[in-house]
Amino acid sequence: MKFQLTYKLFGRSAILVEWPANISQEIIQDIISFERQVKEIDSILDTIIAYNSLLIRYQNPIIDKELTISQLKKIYAASSYLIKQDQFLWQIPVCYDVSFGIDLEEIANKKKCSVAEIIRLHTEGDYLVYFIGFQPGFLYLGGLHQTLHVSRKSNPRLRVDKGSVAIGGIQTGIYPQNSSGGWNIIGKSPLNFFDINASEPCFAKPGDRIKFVAVDIHTFYQIEREVANQKFRIKNSEL
């Protein structure tokens, strides 16, 4: 499926390509496919994916905007819909103990269900990684069950712990570092989601999927120790 795209100059050395302003699996898969084709161009410095856009940064300033855009249009028109390569399902352990999931009971009360039901719904499916942003390693995940949709907090917290698993609107995600934040916290993962010393600082990428796996608090601390000692390996399978 091809979409009607718009192309615009973004600074002196980048082109912003925009898809229809929707959050959809079809659009993000099309963006990923197009990005793979674009990366074959030698003059490309890097690319940045968002929900419905692709920023293409060139090594040098763009001299002829129309020519550059014309080249991109030809690539998109000829590109294949290749989305099944090098994509993985990652199993992410999460402890939903109320000592970590400090907003669990509030959400359960709002939704008129039990905490156990919130946890069940959060772990029953898997989530598509749309893009990485806000912080290095922050995965924007799609596929949250409609029952779990809950507005962000009107007063954000000044401190959210690294590894906190949270819900904000129709999205769920994991805070990769200590930071402020306004999402509703339902658990915590002991994993590192961004390691500047690793060959791949963020193990997941757009197009991958995340599966949350509930663990008890004893297992959480056991995995945390293994992660600190670089002995834990995240389970994954190729899609």
Image (cartoon, rainbow, N blue to C red):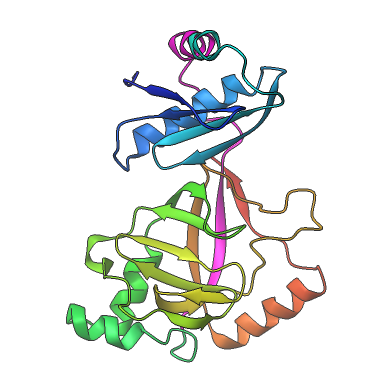
Residue at figure coordinates x 62%, y 71% from the top left = 177
Side (left or right) of 74 relative to 103? right
The image shows residue 45, relative to residue 156, as above or below, that is above
Residue 64 image point, x, y percent: 57, 11
Residue 143 in sight from this viewpoint = yes
Single out the residue that lies furthest toward the left.
112
**Magenta segment: does it hold 105?**
no
Quadrant occupied by the N terminus? top left
Residue at the limit of the structure toward the bottom, as seen here: 99
Q: Is residue 213 positioned above or below 224 on the image? A: above
Foreground of the two, 33 or 120 = 33
The picture places residue 204, in percent across and down from the top left corner, at 60, 50
Rendering coords of residue 73 (x, y %)? 46, 12
Location of residue 232 (image quadrant): bottom right
Q: Residue at x 71, y 26 (%)?
A: 59
Out of 125 and 55, give the one closest to the viewer: 55
- Residue 83 at least partly seen: no
User: Viewer-proximal residue, 196 or 225?
Assistant: 196
Residue drawn at the location 26% of the way across and 70% of the way down = 150
* Relative height, residue 16 to residue 112 (above, below): above
Pick whichever, 231 or 41, lies toward us.
41
Magenta extent: 71-96
Q: Position of residue 67 (x, y in %)?
A: 54, 8
Quadrant of the image occupied by residue 43: top right
Report which quarter residue 108 is drawn in: bottom left
Total labels drawn: 0
